[in-house]
């Protein structure tokens, strides 16, 4: 462990060489990723922080490094027991004093963890929100030196979030109970409304907000019209026989059926849903983590915060209920930065099923929010523009160019000059006072004689009926594209009303052309290989497989997941640069001092061919 920085260090502390030494010697990295330096420096200086960073973007280091440089123990709140174990295993493999404290521990183990905690032997302790906020545990913490509090998966705090958990709400008391301790909230998935709710509920109004962006350029997004879905899934898996992935389905029954059919077809697959016993779920997750299981077929019960970096694909067999879930679930692919795929099978029957589930909820306000989110998800699936632009646009982030790594970019639809249609749509939004949703605007454009239109006097607007030559579906496609491209925005907190953005003004003034895609009936399958990502390495694939085999053997001996030994990205670098000694191996990303001493000799033997 490196020499700690004083807790009284001023905000904005400049990174010292010791921090870079920690990064390299402990975690095996030579440089920080975007935003990490700024966040780490602020936390060391005693500031609070709200961090929104994509899965695989390096959120964990934002609290792990400060915990090693501030006096005391870092308390990390995590929602899943399995995630805690993975994080602790990975930290321990790097030589960090870390432990978890939850209901899985036997009495003797729990006592040992508490003894280490009170004797100052721990750098990081992972706890569940229920355990942390119990009166007994809070009383215990008052006698300890605490480096920081880190709240992972912070979207669970918000009722606007896609995975709200009531037990997380109590965490709002931490800011008042421990006013001098830095508090950092982290999430990979939060739209602007959810972000504001998290900040308010956790008392982080003085915190610096770090939004690192949502883009995962290594993931290729594909949407296929659902026809013979099991056949489509089987064809997809047939070309990926050595890769691990997750298949999501809406119901437990469908999960069971898919897992059984895949197993019968020779695929190493197993089901995972809340109806299975704890033992069965744990066995499935452990087998998947150890690379003994190729495919997990699951409901949304599986995977939040899953720490397996070499998931190469995520398939949605059914339409997710919101973009946040879709983004988080697809984000479980390619956490190591290597090429990954996200396939969505989209059928219109899925919409009615999801709508029925939402409408059975009983809470009118929550139902309204969830129906808006479902409509946005349908808009993504129906999109005729670059899917990455649609996805990022939902979270308030805009790409200036198409991504080149989605099915729409690889097989683009016909485009046309839609300037006049766009001006009609934008003008109509303006004429109705920017106070109505998409359906109402389309009714005005098409000259509807509905009672509501007439009672509001909207039949007297200059835009009434100017779009009667186009169908409701076509106007819907135009509106969605204007949303995706940033000319319009929807206010989810106010009945999804449409509003103009500053980007619409040049169009309305006749200063800018708008080119849109023509709607098409069928979505074509993408045949191209996944994009290799920026700075992709040319590596020896045969050597990579031998290194994987060694990693699996070592991991099995130590009873840990293979990625705890080394991630796929590290093995790719080894197979590309072929280091021949300790110095060369130490320059590979992900090889820290502790792992070099433990594994270096074995991996160098394989690289040099001494094992043959």
Image (cartoon, helix red, strand yellow):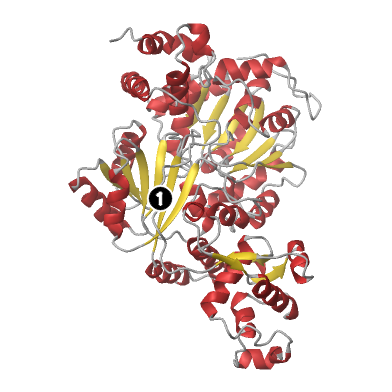
Q: Quadrant of residue 266?
A: top left
Report if residue 42 is visible in the image.
yes
Mark 1 neighbour density, 10 Å: few (under 14) some (14–19) many (20 or more): few
558, 15: nearer the viewer: 15
Give the quarter of the figure containing the C terminus: top left
Q: Which residue is mark 1?
A: 301
| Outermost residue to the left | 264
121, 283: nearer the viewer: 283
- The local secondary structure at tag 1 comes to loop
Coordinates of residue 134 in the picture (x, y in percent): 56, 41
Using the image, determine if residue 49 lies above or below residue 346: above
Residue displayed at 56% across by 48% down: 403
Coordinates of residue 49 in the picture (x, y in percent): 70, 39
- Say left or right for 68 vs 376: right
Residue displayed at 55% across by 34% down: 534
Report if residue 164 is visible in the image.
no
Coordinates of residue 31 in the picture (x, y in percent): 63, 23
| Outermost residue to the right | 10
Using the image, determine if residue 463 lies above or below residue 408: below
Residue displayed at 57% across by 76% down: 475
Give the quarter of the figure containing the N terminus: top right
Using the image, determine if residue 183 lies above or below residue 506: above
Coordinates of residue 361 in the picture (x, y in percent): 47, 68
Using the image, determine if residue 241 lies above or below residue 189: above
């Amino acid at each position: 462990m490196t020499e700690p920085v004083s807790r009284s260090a001023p905000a904005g502390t400049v990174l010292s060489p010791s921090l870079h030494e920690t990064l390299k010697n402990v975690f095996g990295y030579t440089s920080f990723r975007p935003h990490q330096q700024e966040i780490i420096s602020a936390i060391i200086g005693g500031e609070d922080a709200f961090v929104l960073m994509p899965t695989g973007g390096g959120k964990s280091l934002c609290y792990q490094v400060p915990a090693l440089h501030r006096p005391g123990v870092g308390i990390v709140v995590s929602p899943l027991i399995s995630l805690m174990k993975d994080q602790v295993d990975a930290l321990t493999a790097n030589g960090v004093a870390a432990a978890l404290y939850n209901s899985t521990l036997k009495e003797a183990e729990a006592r040992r963890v508490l003894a280490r905690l009170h004797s100052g032997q721990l750098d990081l302790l992972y706890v569940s929100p229920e355990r942390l906020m119990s009166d007994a545990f809070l009383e215990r913490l008052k006698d300890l030196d605490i480096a920081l509090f880190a709240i992972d998966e912070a979207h669970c705090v918000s009722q606007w979030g896609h995975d709200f958990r009531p037990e997380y709400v109590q965490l709002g008391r931490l800011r008042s109970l421990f006013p001098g301790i830095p508090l950092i909230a982290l999430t990979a998935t939060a739209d602007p409304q959810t972000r504001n709710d998290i900040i308010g509920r956790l008392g982080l109004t003085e915190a610096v907000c770090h939004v690192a962006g949502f883009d995962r350029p290594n993931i290729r997004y594909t949407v296929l019209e659902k026809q013979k879905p099991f056949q489509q899934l089987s064809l997809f898996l047939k070309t990926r026989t050595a890769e691990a992935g997750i298949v999501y389905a809406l119901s437990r029954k469908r999960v069971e059926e898919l897992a059984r059919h895949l197993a019968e077809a020779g695929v190493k697959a197993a089901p995972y849903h809340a109806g299975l016993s704890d033992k069965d779920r744990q066995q499935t997750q452990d087998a998947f983590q150890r690379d003994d299981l190729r495919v997990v077929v699951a409901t949304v019960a599986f995977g939040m915060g899953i720490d397996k970096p070499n998931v190469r694909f995520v398939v949605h067999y059914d339409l997710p209920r919101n973009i946040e879930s879709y983004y988080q679930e697809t984000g479980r692919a390619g956490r190591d930065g290597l090429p990954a795929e996200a396939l969505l099978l989209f059928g219109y029957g899925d919409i009615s099923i999801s709508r029925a589930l939402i409408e059975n909820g009983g809470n009118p306000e929550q139902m309204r929010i969830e129906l808006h989110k479902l409509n946005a998800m349908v808009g993504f699936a129906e999109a005729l523009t670059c899917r990455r632009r649609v996805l990022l646009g939902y979270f308030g982030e805009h790409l200036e160019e198409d991504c080149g790594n989605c099915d729409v970019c690889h097989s683009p639809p016909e485009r046309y000059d839609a300037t006049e249609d766009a001006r009609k749509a934008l003008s109509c939004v303006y004429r109705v006072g920017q106070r109505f949703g998409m359906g109402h605007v389309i009714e005005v454009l098409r000259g509807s004689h509905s009672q509501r239109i007439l009672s509001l006097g909207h039949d007297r607007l200059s835009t009434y009926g100017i779009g009667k030559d186009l169908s409701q579906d076509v106007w819907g496609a135009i509106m969605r594209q204007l949303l995706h491209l940033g000319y319009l925005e929807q206010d989810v907190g106010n009945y999804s009303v449409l509003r103009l953005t500053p980007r619409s003004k040049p169009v309305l003034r006749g200063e800018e052309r708008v080119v849109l895609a023509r709607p098409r009936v069928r979505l074509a399958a993408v045949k191209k290989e996944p994009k290799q990502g920026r700075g992709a390495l040319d590596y020896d694939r045969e050597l990579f497989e031998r290194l994987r085999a060694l990693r699996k053997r070592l991991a099995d001996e130590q009873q840990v997941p293979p990625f705890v030994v080394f991630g796929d990205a590290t093995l790719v670098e080894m197979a590309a640069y072929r280091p021949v000694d300790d110095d060369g191996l130490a320059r590979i990303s992900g090889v820290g001092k502790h792992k070099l001493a433990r594994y270096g000799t074995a991996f160098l033997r394989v690289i040099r061919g001494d094992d043959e």
